Amino acid sequence: MASVCKIVTRQLSTSVGRQGPVKYLTVIGSGLMGSGIAQVAAATGHNVTLVDQTDDILNKSMGNMKKSLERVAKKKYADNPKDGEEFISGVMGRISTNTDSSKAVEKADLVIEAIVENLGVKKQLFSALDKAAPQHTIFTSNTSSIPITDIAASTQRRDRFGGLHYFNPVPMMKLLEVVRTSETNDETFNTLMEFGKAMGKVTVPCKDTAGFIVNRLLVPYMLEAVRLVERGDAAPRDIDVAMKLGAGYPMGPFELSDYVGLDTMKFILDGWHERDPDHPLFKPSALLNKLVGEGKLGMKTGEGFYKHKK
Ligand SMILES: CCCCCCCC(=O)CC(=O)SCCNC(=O)CCNC(=O)[C@H](O)C(C)(C)COP(=O)(O)OP(=O)(O)OC[C@H]1O[C@@H](n2cnc3c(N)ncnc32)[C@H](O)[C@@H]1OP(=O)(O)O
Ligand SMILES: NC(=O)C1=CN([C@@H]2O[C@H](COP(=O)(O)OP(=O)(O)OC[C@H]3O[C@@H](n4cnc5c(N)ncnc54)[C@H](O)[C@@H]3O)[C@@H](O)[C@H]2O)C=CC1
């Protein structure tokens, strides 16, 4: 696989004023990942501003977070439902919403971007945020597959830019990959590691290489599963059963694809194909293209490789 890590030698000034514990967090994108990140950050005492394109989307996200918190509270406060209700209202009270991303970063110590997996769209967003955010604000992306260096290039704060890669579902998955580029300064990296721990996650440092650690291994595995089906060698359900019972995975690759979102999978595949056009695994997938073209994006639309109850 061609290396996607670009070495950029220019080091920007590190004299940016305050950096320290994160009090005010802005999460941009309130979909599957952004809502999970906002929820867990608020549950661990952070003040969160959650941003998306419309109030309708944000209202839906707030509803999803409440449902998820109810599941958490049911277990955590099994003996005392009243404390559970207070826990939920406390967490929800620490989350505010905004449809104006530039306004939403005016007070932020840290920004976590979790919008669509598209380099151009992410760069456009960060270029605007760079002008609106205070000097000390650290920028991060939750990208699954795009080099952080490429996204950071849209800003003048490449020393205060890193990756925070969470896993789905964020309230349940304990891992956080903390990505440092060749330009991320020590203060920023240390703040991100501390923030991850403050959110209750186990942090692993990663270099800015394709897929970091988990997706460097997981993406080829999931694409190999799609290729097995495309060749007619096995059916999705049989592959899922095989990987759960034969390899001990909690979900098979097609259950996981529906959980992640087939649109996100396609964005990842197309992006890696563009970077490494000769790699056979990253050639466009007719099956994935067909399902995405039909709006079958997985659990979020009620159908992907499988049908789901909405
Ligand atoms: C082209 C390639 C593309 C690659 C894409 C890469 C995308 C990325 O960049 C990186 C990723 O995130 S990859 C995805 C990583 N995630 C996984 O692998 C998840 C695998 N599944 C699991 O771990 C469990 O099935 C799981 C933990 C999800 C659920 O557990 P169970 O299987 O035991 O099932 P349940 O009975 O549903 O759940 C048990 C209890 O867990 C709690 N819970 C589950 N979901 C929750 C949620 N969203 N919020 C809060 N609590 C939740 C809950 O307590 C539940 O009990 P009940 O509430 O009583 O059902
Ligand atoms: N789905 C997954 O399992 C994982 C995804 N990721 C990454 O997280 C990011 C988000 O993925 P998902 O949450 O799954 O996507 P999603 O499609 O569920 O949510 C994306 C949200 O961003 C919003 N959005 C798009 N452009 C925007 C803009 N310019 N300003 C504000 N909001 C905007 C959309 O309205 C949508 O609500 C992607 O970079 C993805 O690769 C990372 C780990 C796991």
Image (cartoon, helix red, strand yellow):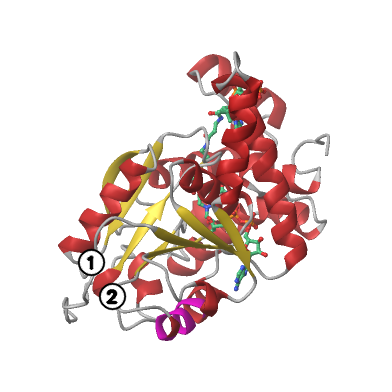
**Residue under the image location 79 percent in, 48 percent down:** 301
Left of 70 or right of it: where is 124? Answer: left
Left of 134 or right of it: where is 75? Answer: right
- The local crowd at label 1, few if under 14, some if 14 to 19, many if 20 or more residues have their Cα within 10 Å, is many
- The local crowd at label 2, few if under 14, some if 14 to 19, many if 20 or more residues have their Cα within 10 Å, is many
Q: Main secondary structure of the magenta part?
A: helix
Type of amino acid under label 1: Thr
Q: Quadrant of the N terminus?
A: bottom left
**Residue under the image location 68 percent in, 23 percent down:** 238
Q: Position of residue 258 (x, y in %)?
A: 68, 41
Q: Which residue is mark 1?
A: 184
Instruction: Classify mark 1: helix, strand or loop.
Output: loop
The mark that comes first in sequence, 2 or 1, is: 2
Q: Position of residue 87 (x, y in %)?
A: 57, 34
Q: Position of residue 279 (x, y in %)?
A: 45, 57
**Residue under the image location 70 percent in, 36 percent down:** 232
Residue 158's label in the rendered image is 2
- Quarter where residue 210 is shown: bottom left
Figure check: 201 above or below 234: below
**Outermost residue toward the bottom in this view:** 131
Type of amino acid under label 2: Arg
- What is the magenta range? 125-131
Figure check: 195 above or below 119: above
Most foreground residue, 163 or 34: 34
Instruction: Classify mark 2: helix, strand or loop.
Output: helix
Figure check: 249 above or below 170: above
Q: Are marks 2 and 1 in contact (CB under 8 Å)?
A: yes
